Image: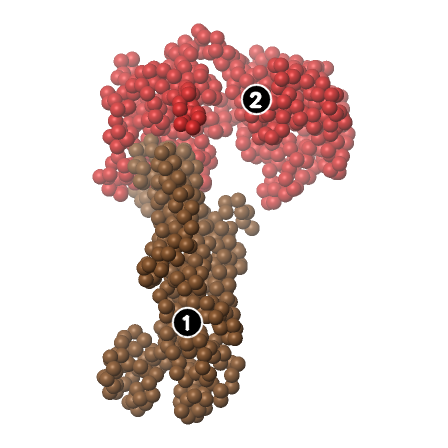
Amino acid sequence: MSTAIDLAPEKPALLSPLNQRRLANFRANRRGWWSLWIFLVIFVVTLGAEFIANDRPILVSYKGELMVPALVDYPESKFGGFFATTNFRDPFIAEEIAANGWMLWPPVRFSYNTVDSYVAFSGANPPSWLLTREQLCQRYPLGVEDPNCVPGNFHFLGTDDRGRDVLARLIYGFRISVLFGLVLTVVSSVIGVVAGAMQGYFGGWVDLIAQRLIEIWTSIPALYLLLIISSVIAPSFWVLLGILLLFSWVTLVGIVRAEFLRARNFEYVNAARALGVSNRVIMWRHLLPNAMVATLTFMPFILSGSVATLTSLDFLGFGLPPGSPSLGELLAQGKNNLQAPWLGLTGFFTIAIMMTLLVFIGEAVRDAFDPRKTFR
Amino acid sequence: MSAPLLSVRDLSVSFGPHEAVRNVSFDIAPGETLALVGESGSGKSVTALSVLKLLPPTARIDGDIRFEGENLTTATEAALRAVRGNRVGMIFQEPMSSLNPVHTVGKQIGEVLAVHQGLRRNAARARTLELLDAVGIPDPASRLDDFPHQLSGGQRQRVMIAMALANDPKLLIADEPTTALDVTVQAQILDLLKTLQRQNGMAMLFITHDLSIVRRIADRVCVMTKGEIVESGPVGTIFADPQHAYTKHLLAAAPRGVPLEPAPDARKVVEAAELKVWFPIRRGLFRRTVGHIKAVDGVDLAIQKGETLGVVGESGSGKSSLGYALLRLIPSQGRIVLLGNDVQSRSWRALRPLRKHMQIVFQDPFGSLSPRMSVGQIVEEGLGVHFPHLTRAERADKVAAALREVGLDPATVNRYPHEFSGGQRQRIAIARALVLEPELLVLDEPTSALDVSIQAQVIDLLRDVQARRQLSYLFISHDLRVVRALAHRLIVMRNGKVVEAGLAADVFAAPRQDYTRQLLAAALDIVPPAADALPSAPRTD
């Protein structure tokens, strides 16, 4: 009997039985499970946006030297020019490199801010699959025979009214939207959980006063305030994040507070108090896991809400600085160029699909954490 | 015996692959009381519910249930409705949740009368008054328009009985009707059922886990375990001469043994004087304190090393609040001295070093263990606070020793609470307290949520631990039989005040106060010294 017992699990189980059940529940919701995978694939792919849509080649071999222009800025002097940065789309540079090596271009040869000077028409250009090859290449010096008349230089989803590639802007815009949403969700959840935990655990006056303050705070019309602030401060990614954070952290306070209020008198919490465990440890070890269920359930919905807020601000022109790739700006372009419906349609479908995926994932998470859901 | 009123043959009930009841057969003659006894999970309630087909639709019922010759297993819903609440009445365990909280008592009884007898308005009202009077509700006319929450637990159960009896049923099915009630109320309800049964000449199917109630009320008894009836017969025979091993086990399971004698001049471990737990009642805009709910109102106590102080009282008497206040888990006024240290004046942080000397075991073994922590983590938690210098291996050794001491295999450290039975969980909770080597252990109804046979084991364990470690217990319980097996001294509480205090043996032998006498009579008279001294249950025929 006196064998030494190690407290660490002999076979470290990755997930507790409860979490295994939750994972199984999540996977049982096929729609949510597939949505998660589709979303993850799109997200991971757009994370590498520079390698998919860029006005610089991914790899260049020039005079035996291997270069990665997608990641590094090379001065033009390297290729016999005199500008500080190299424009690889410049025919002179392209010929120079072609003569002394090779270039590997990404599938889309435009970045979000590249203005294509060889577009077929002025203004917004329709998607390439609506045009003939002759039309697409009519502005190139050699027409259809031009070496640049390749699919990488076509605009699969057309261009906006400034000749920028919609697909490239979409890829970059999706990335920035999701990243913005994720950061906002995580930071506001952390703040919300801490605030809710304090109120719920200590209760009494702390709770009473904090609740009233939050009520006053939430009665401020956030969107108007945002408009005012962003017309004073030049909005950047982080400024915008900070402003939105001011109002988004309250979403979770209510539910976390309720969970803590409910659980703080559980017998095992009382038992921990009787053991002399400190408040902070009790909150972290015993109460937080209870609140995490509610928090995790809400997170996908907060994420989609954050993305929607950013999009609406961009649409109104108070969002990210001008020139940034953004879905809202794409929608605004669509509104201003009704003669080019591909702009609005692209923006609409992208946002609709993204939101739908997020909501489906959220529903599956909610189901997975639902203790009353019977598991078949 | 005449033709049976209810005859159950080869009843099997299964929920999916799980068979809850297997081949159960019994008869009830008119006017007879049959008790179904068993521990939780034995299938006794399922059996009772299947008689009226009140089980969820997932249940599969096989066998033959005949009531007055009519086969209920094949009966249509309409035919069943004519039986339910009419010829067969039913009482449930929880009087609060069995009554609809948004309808008045009169309306709910009236509904039964309207459905089965077509009585309306004045006729229904007159009959309702008659029924409420019959079940012993004082001044029924004024109670008619009360809502369930305005009644006490006992009164609610009386209303339930009135509803069950409204249509003069031939058979009354009572599913643990007294389990949720205090002992004195329990006794009253049992007396009431017995009287009403005699008056109306109805038969009763009485489901309970409590053998003392069986002795008091039943004519015949069926002992169930694991979905099967293992033994049945007249009450006297079963109690005097049980045949089946399980029945013997159940009968022997009542908490037994006598408390150990502590050393006569042992030092005082804890002392409290004028202890008060007052919850303020606040009213109005400025939350002015207009009064107090006096949960504990001026209690003095002292416990010596190796001694058990029993605290008994009915629900709401403040006995649990007393235990919590002693550990400063709820705020209180008055002096508390633990091992010569003043507990009340210390800050929460300064109190921490003292906490390892005083520990608590809670009533509900399902609620007191965090479902997200393994047994090892649960037991170890206090060590991290009080013995932070211990190495991992030393901590593991201490946890293993504590688990061994409470009779658990130390190899179970990596398992989670939900994998254990109620008794085992209570052992884990005790191990969590013992690992800190406390001087004082507050036991807040540690056996109430457990089956009788498990209760006895936990009591034996507590006594062993006390003998080995010279621990002091504050043992809080409403169950006098359990207290008698463990406590040296006793305080009886009522409405926050100590009604009577003294040596346990003295209080049990010669209670000085009326209330104590009443409590003892209700709780212990049900256990006569020998089964043959049992007065034979009155029969109506």
Secondary structure found at label 1:
helix
Locate residue A65: give its quadrant: bottom left
> Splitting the image into 4 quarters, where does residue A155 fall?
bottom left
Query: Which residue is tagged 1?
Result: A169
Q: Which mark is residue B440?
A: none
Q: Residues within 10 Å of mark 1 (few under 14, many from 20)?
A: many
* Same subunit: marks 1 and 2: no
In the displayed structure, A34 sits above or below A160; it is above
The colour of chain B is: red
Q: Amino acid at mark 1?
A: Arg
Chain where mark 2 sits = B
Q: Residue at x 56, y 28 (%)?
A: B96
Closest to the observer, B346 or B387 = B346
Chain letter corresponding to the colour brown: A
Query: Total label count?
Result: 2
Residue position marked by numbered label 2 in the rendering: B151
- Residue for point 34% across, 88% down: A91
